[in-house]
Amino acid sequence: MYGIVLNVHSWLRWVVLIAMLWTILRAVLPGPRAWTPADDRSLRLSVISLDVQFLLGLLLYFVLSPFTREAMSDMGAAMRSPGLRFFAVEHVAGMLIAITLAHVGAVRIRKAAPERRHRLAAIFFILALLAVLASIPWPGLPAGRPLFRL
């Protein structure tokens, strides 16, 4: 079960990144343009994909992962181990920041005047994307994982 959820979580990162990039691209396209249903779809896809990814991450974190189980058994030792610290604290904190930015941004965008929506989408989703990128276990890092799991 752990392997299946981990693989889905790993592959879903690409959906999240593409959806967020799509939202950002639509927000920063040059020229004045109205907020369209396509902008709503990109926003909704970004938030939904982040939510699904977050739920899978919580399942891994609290139920399935041997890394977090080991880290929780001795948090002091986990803080001294870059790999364990990353998954026990840094990855989770960064993703919580990203999902918070995306949700707050989505609410602010929906409530904003139409002429401000693109600017808000750009600000909130660029910040959320930066948090996601900083929290992914990229290859070469102490807690690095492969870009594509098979």
Image (cartoon, rainbow, N blue to C red):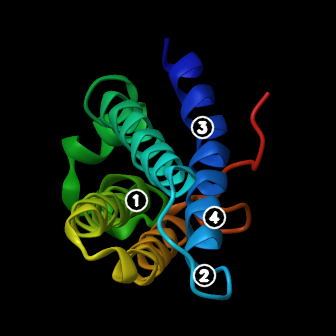
Q: Position of residue 47 (x, y in %)?
A: 40, 48
Q: Name the quarter where the C terminus is drawn.
A: top right
| First of labels 1, 4 by sequence position | 4
Q: Front-most of 20 and 111?
A: 111
Cβ atoms at labels 4 and 3 below 8 Å apart: no
Q: CA distance from mark 1 to mark 4?
A: 20 Å
Instruction: Give the secondary structure at mark 4.
Output: helix
Tag in front: 4 or 3: 4
Cβ atoms at labels 3 and 2 below 8 Å apart: no
Tag in front: 1 or 3: 3
Q: CA distance from mark 4 to mark 3?
A: 14 Å
Tag 4: amino acid: Leu
Tag 2: amino acid: Val
| First of labels 4, 3 by sequence position | 3
For disc 3, the marked residue is 12
Tag in front: 2 or 4: 2
For disc 1, the marked residue is 91
Instruction: Give the secondary structure at mark 3.
Output: helix
For disc 4, the marked residue is 21
Check disc 1: other Cα within 10 Å, few if <14, some if 14-19, many if 20+: some
Cβ atoms at labels 2 and 1 below 8 Å apart: no
Tag 1: amino acid: His
| First of labels 2, 1 by sequence position | 2
Check disc 3: other Cα within 10 Å, few if <14, some if 14-19, many if 20+: some
The residue depicted at 72 percent of the width and 61 percent of the height is: 139
Q: Give the label on residue 28, or none.
A: 2
The residue depicted at 61 percent of the width and 68 percent of the height is: 26
Q: Give the label on residue 3, or none.
A: none
Residue 126, compared with residue 70, is above or below; it is: below
Q: Front-most of 34 and 107?
A: 34
Q: Position of residue 136 (x, y in %)?
A: 55, 60
| First of labels 1, 3 by sequence position | 3
